[in-house]
Image (spheres, helix red, strand yellow):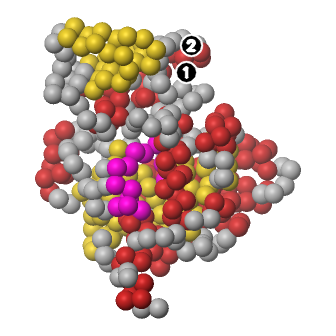
Amino acid sequence: MTEQDTGQTKEEAVNHGPLPGNVHAVILAGGQGTRFWPMSRKARPKPFLPFGDGKESLIQATARRARELVGDASRLWVVTNEVQRALAEEHVPDARIISESLPRNTAAAIGLAAAHIRAVDPSAVMVVLPADHAIEREDLLLAALREASALASAEPLIVTVGVPPTSPHTGYGYIRRGASLRGSSYMVHRFYEKPNQERAEQYVASGLYCWNSGMFISSVETAWSAFEEHMPELFGALEKVTAALETAEYEAVVRGQFEPLESISIDFGVLELARNCAMVWSEPFGWNDIGSWDAWADHFEHDARDNLFRGDVVAIESEGCTVHSEHRLCALVEVSNIVVVDSGDALLICSRDRVQDVKLVVDELRKRGRNDLL
């Protein structure tokens, strides 16, 4: 069938429809989202909360996009912890759920998913997606993920999706692009952790840096080799877990092998050490990782005084405020640049420039034994 017969160019055909049958989507949904307290709790963390004015949770939106990529729900996986397994089954009932008895950060979570997928299809390609991202232009994200998947299928590369920065944000990691590969793809020159304001401004001004989206695509064999080279302790644990798959001892083996492991992110454990990392320089697709209340607020239109209100709110001579109140009236009088979040059993009030530190409240509650509010 020719392009004329289908009405599509080759490029359009690549950017539409499900990916080949060996591509699996892995959704990471094990975190609590402490900077999103008091709405995000252990019992219902951020990925399982509705976002915006609709009823769809963040993980449901992520799963919907993932299904567009893989087509067959048998190739849709969710990695979560035991506490959140029931929520994962409720929100994504058609996915294969992998629960960690002892969460050990994203490196171990991705490794565990790789062990399961590798046992099903050693030729598989994994598209790893955080569960808690909000996306405005889903078509552009899907196009970037398809390009990344094609690259990872063809080359032994770990590919990420770079998000062109719209501001010198200090709450995101950055990636500097290296040599051009093909299309919108580049080798990664280096990953950078969250910068200060001055450095972030330099990154954005140079035109060489993207935000790190936290999405990673590679074949399972490429990932397996990376764990063997850069994280030998985790690799040894994963080999034992692989041997125990589909046995009655599986849960005990996972717990026994993961307990002594250090909690390390995939960024620190693999990506910052590997020399086979690539990136797709995506078109801007309205990415927001909803990592804190200011990031949440950035996703919505503010009023003429830069306020964002959700719920029953009265504001008098106030500006630059974000308010989320689910249960009662919140009244503001001549205040500016504050965040107020009322979850019913807890009230958060902080300045907008300190929202990244909300996690300190969770740390303090944990010290005080206030498990009812965690």
Residue at the image point whose x is 46% and y is 29% from the top: 34
Residue 374 circle label: 1
Q: Looking at the picture, how far across and down is residue 262, in whole percent?
A: 57, 42
Q: In this view, which residue lies farthest toward the right?
A: 248
**Secondary structure of residue under mark 2:** loop
Q: Looking at the picture, how far across and down is residue 327, in whole percent?
A: 46, 14
Q: Are marks 2 and 1 in contact (CB under 8 Å)?
A: yes
> Is residue 127 positioned above or below 98 on the image?
below
Residue at the image point whose x is 19% and y is 15% from the top: 318
Q: Looking at the picture, how far across and down is residue 51, in whole percent?
A: 44, 36
Q: Which of 363 and 274 lies nearest the eye of the viewer? A: 363
The residue where tag 2 is placed is 370
Q: Quadrant of residue 67?
A: bottom right
Start-end of magenta stretch: 128-142
> Is residue 231 positioned above or below 294 on the image?
below
* Res 224 visible: no
Q: Quadrant of the C terminus?
A: top right
Q: Which of 106 and 9 lies nearest the eye of the viewer? A: 9
Q: Residues within 10 Å of mark 2 (few under 14, many from 20)?
A: few
Residue at the image point whose x is 64% and y is 37% from the top: 87
> In the shown orientation, is residue 65 left or right of residue 300?
right
Q: Residues within 10 Å of mark 1 (few under 14, many from 20)?
A: many
> In the shown orientation, is residue 76 left or right of residue 271?
right
Residue at the image point whose x is 26% and y is 10% from the top: 332
Q: Amino acid type of disc 1?
A: Leu
> In the shown orientation, is residue 49 left or right of residue 201?
right
**Secondary structure of residue under mark 1:** loop
Q: Amino acid type of disc 2?
A: Arg
Q: Which of 1 and 282 lies nearest the eye of the viewer? A: 1
* Res 309 visible: yes
> In the shown orientation, is residue 152 left or right of residue 282?
right
